Image: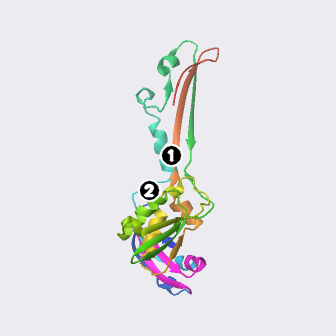
Amino acid sequence: VIARCPELGAELTSFDATAAQAQPGVVGVVALPAGVAVVAENFWAARSAAQLVKLEWSPGPLANKSDVSILQEQRQQLQRDPASADYVDADGDIEAALQADGSTRIEAAYTTPYLVHAPMEPLNATVHVRADGCDVWVPAQAPDIVREVARDILGFRRHQVHVHTTYIGGGFGRRFMWDFVTEAVEVARHFVVPVQLIWTREDDIRHGYFRQLTVHQVRGAIDPAGNILAWDH
């Protein structure tokens, strides 16, 4: 289990894992760019010890960003002159339609929030690194990418990395990413036995990849009979 820097993009500068290493069942601690991995004999021992790691980090480039500030930025982009805007889709001459005699203007804005994939099965990967090769057991949507990630990190040839694709407890595109595989390989290379990395649900919600927050503006014009004259998005 990894004790992670709490802010997206933050970098670990120092840590104190003294209390974590003293916990029953803990067998090792490994520093990673994302934080500090605590390896123990079982998940609960690792998770409990990880909560005791003291982290020092430098804020990343997104330290002052939030859902609110990003939504404001998106909305401000819609305040520019509509005639100069680049629209995703359109039908007809919207500017002429809006000026036509008897036409009625209809306009609406829609937003979608950041959405976490939140697969039912937590992100996980089990990796066994040996001198002559590596085995990876992982619920992945792109096992060939998993092989390349492990090969690049360990310096092995392609045939030395064996990926065992397990059942996927929900993917939704999240398991096309390889961040959790990279972490598992980086940790496992320090041990002679297989190591399983498990993301907690808190890890998944705070540090996962999200579907993008978006703001959409739709304009249209209809004639007195209710027929659509033109619209853009």
* Residue 70 sits above or below residue 14 on the image: above
Residue 57 or 90: which is nearer the viewer?
Answer: 90
The colour scheme of the drawn protein is rainbow
Q: Which residue is mark 2?
A: 64
Q: Could you say where residue 224 lies in the image, as x and y percent from the top left?
A: 63, 14
Residue lying at 44% horizontally and 66% vertically, measured from the top left: 182
- Residue 161: horizontal and vertical position, in percent? 43, 68
Give the quarter of the image for residue 82.
Answer: top left
Mark 2 Cα-neighbour bin, 10 Å: few <14, some 14–19, many ≥20: few
Asked whether disc 2 touches disc 1, contact meaning CB atoms under 8 Å apart, the reply is no
Is the residue marked by circle 1 packed among few (<14), some (14-19), or many (20+) residues within 10 Å? Answer: some
Q: Which disc number belongs to residue 100?
A: none
Residue at image point 60% right, 15% down: 223
Question: Going by the picture, which residue comes out furthest to the top?
Answer: 101
Rendered position, 9 above or below 16? above
Task: Please say whether residue 11 is visible from this viewpoint.
Answer: no
What label sits on residue 71 in the rendered view?
1
Secondary structure of the residue carrying numbered label 2: loop
Badge 1 marks a residue whose secondary structure is helix
User: Residue 198's quadrant in the figure?
Assistant: bottom right
N-term-proximal mark, 2 vs 1? 2
Q: Nearer the viewer, residue 178 or 95?
A: 178
Q: Amino acid at mark 1?
A: Leu
Q: CA distance from mark 2 to mark 1?
A: 13 Å
Q: Position of residue 187 (x, y in %)?
A: 45, 74
Residue 179, compared with residue 82, is above or below; it is: below
Residue at 39% in and 64% down: 158
Give percent across and percent down for residue 140: 53, 60
- Furthest residue to the left? 155
Which contiguous range is marked in magenta?
A: 24-47
Q: Amino acid at mark 2?
A: Asn
